[in-house]
Image (cartoon, rainbow, N blue to C red):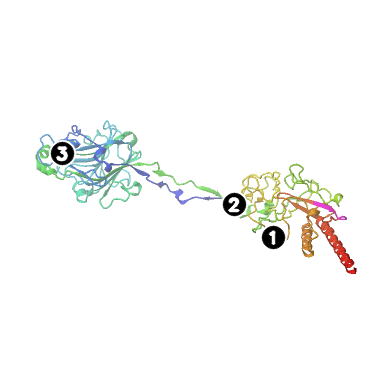
Amino acid sequence: MHFSTFISGVALLQLSIAGYVLQDDYMNDFYGSFEFFTEADPTKGFVQYIGESEARELGLINSNNSKTASVEWGVETTKQTPEGRPSLRLESKKSYEHGLVVLDVQHMPFGCGTWPAFWMLGPDWPENGEIDILEGVHEETHNGITLHTGPGCAVESEAGGFSGSLDTPNCDVNAEGQSKNKGCTIKSPTEKSYGAGLNSNEGGVYATEWSNDAISVFFFPRGEVPDDALGDNPDPTAWGKPAAKFASTGCDIKGMFNDQKIIIDTTFCGEWAGNTWNTSTCASKAPTCNEYVRDNPEAFKEAYWTVNALRVYQENGEASVPGPEPTVVPTPEPSDIPTPSDTELPPAPTSNDPFPSIPAPAVPVPSNATFSPIAPPAPIPTNNSPPSIAPPETIPSQVPEAPAQPTLAPPAPLPTANATSPPPAPPAPPGSLPPGAGQSTRSPLKPSKPTHRTDSSIAQPTGSKPGSQGSGFQWPKGGGSKPKPNVPAQSSTRLATPSSAPSVSQASSPLNSAIASLVSLTTAAPDLPGPSGAVGVDAVATVWETVYVTVPAAAPVESPAASAAGVGAKRVRQVRQRRRRAMQHDARR
């Protein structure tokens, strides 16, 4: 057997299916999905974080919580604030272990003294990490994407791994050679990513993909956002290089980032903006950052957020699907395919004739061999069988019994008017046919003794369905195309008796026709092989069996029907002679 291996082209490639599905859509109930943080600022900013009710009273929240509308909130811009400027810090009620976080931001806070951020934070900082997605101070022009961790996490500059520029490589908040709490930072390559540049471009989309392998941050300016970025099944693998990528090769992403909450806030001054005031472009506006924030409420009219969408996606387990394994399909060579000549199977019928001629398998049979019980039709059963076949009383001694063990191949049955299918041909010896060479996949069934019926209906074989094909047997679908002419229907296997002969009152033409029909029934049998010295065959057909009766050549059997017809003709002549004599006698008178 020759085998050909078919390998699908996709098997040579690793399918990259992001497999992300939407988990949380924060726009369904934006403010209801967050906690309003009201404690002192952990970053020591000059700010007062207030709750939702107070923020609404001050008019800092501008939203009707519509599922389709953007949400917008800002800071206090009407008065001086000696204790810090009122603002909002929103922390998500849910925390995450991984996922794809997508933010569509149209406007962000900007200006001297401001420190806005969209970020994620774990408990027990810095043990469970911090991911700063969108963050900056004062009048910066490029977004800084930063990780904050404990010892053992650093950025390995991958060749072509991200499009941004590496600012500081060590993510440890206490790393030597870096300012305290600097972390590892990658600067975005475009000015449209932060502050005035982002706001003038009507914002853009930030997408943060967080897995065990890496933390990657993508940024798409307005007009360059992929169609699927906020769709039902976003696929980051089709988005090109991220602006920043922190791979697990230099950091244990799984161990260092856990239970992250989403945070959006606007603080002022503090540890970053306050400490860099004197080196920024804002130093000339006030001696300190706190003084500027306290005394200039109108300077913070641009310190507000406008968010169009915030969604969190999770992988559905199909993030990386290997291609299908090579499929090995056995393809036999033409010379290897078994043919009917190899297996000695009878040819299949080529017509719709329900009485196809199915020859016996051409298997050499020794002269002294005998057939197994399943090959030829068994002798006439003695129990549970139809009425026995009795020959006419005139020739009882001239009809020998049929042999119980024929020594030749079983002859083809003689089709009758009621017989709708031939008996099944004997199956080939077990194991002689390979699978697929015209042999059924089911094991051959041993033929069971048929159940005779006294009516003309046809019993369906056990285990078969009309129109189906069993081992060596095909259930006929309709009547024969070449029925025997003028053969009377038989409802049983009883031979015709003299009582079935036509009466003397019938005319000579119908009588002769009936006699011819009966004679054709007994003489039209094919010349079938039989025991040596036997000629002539009488066939009696049932639904399932055919019994052959032979007579010696020296004493051919006279047809019962023909005998009956002869007696009837003799009587007719006698009646006619008596009538003529009576008419002549009357005429003499």
Q: Is residue 12 magenta?
A: no
Front one among 413 and 513: 513
Q: Label 1 amino acid?
A: Lys
Determine whether the residue tagged by mark 1 lies in a helix, strand or loop: loop
Crowding at dot 1, Cα within 10 Å, few <14 / some 14-19 / many 20+, comes out as few
Image quarter of residue 35? top left
Can the viewer see residue 275 in this picture? no
Which dot, 3 or 1, sits closer to the camera? Answer: 1
Residue 188 in the image, given as x and y percentages of width and height: 25, 46
Q: Which residue is mark 1?
A: 482
Spatial CA span between label 3 and label 1: 101 Å
Spatial CA span between label 3 and label 2: 83 Å
Crowding at dot 2, Cα within 10 Å, few <14 / some 14-19 / many 20+, comes out as few
Q: Residue at x 12, y 34 (%)?
A: 83
Q: Please state, as top left, top right, bottom left or bottom right, where the C terminus lies in the image.
A: bottom right
Q: Earlier in the sequence, mark 2 or mark 1?
A: 2
Q: Which residue is mark 2?
A: 332
Residue 92 in the image, given as x and y percentages of width and height: 26, 37
Q: Label 2 amino acid?
A: Pro
Can the viewer see residue 448 in this picture? yes
Q: Residue at x 69, y 60 (%)?
A: 482
Spatial CA span between label 2 and label 1: 41 Å
Q: Which residue is mark 3?
A: 57
Q: Is residue 554 magenta?
A: yes
Residue 369 in the image, given as x and y percentages of width and height: 78, 46
Q: Earlier in the sequence, mark 3 or mark 2?
A: 3
Q: Which residues are magenta?
A: 549-555
Q: State left or right for residue 434 relative to residue 323.
A: right
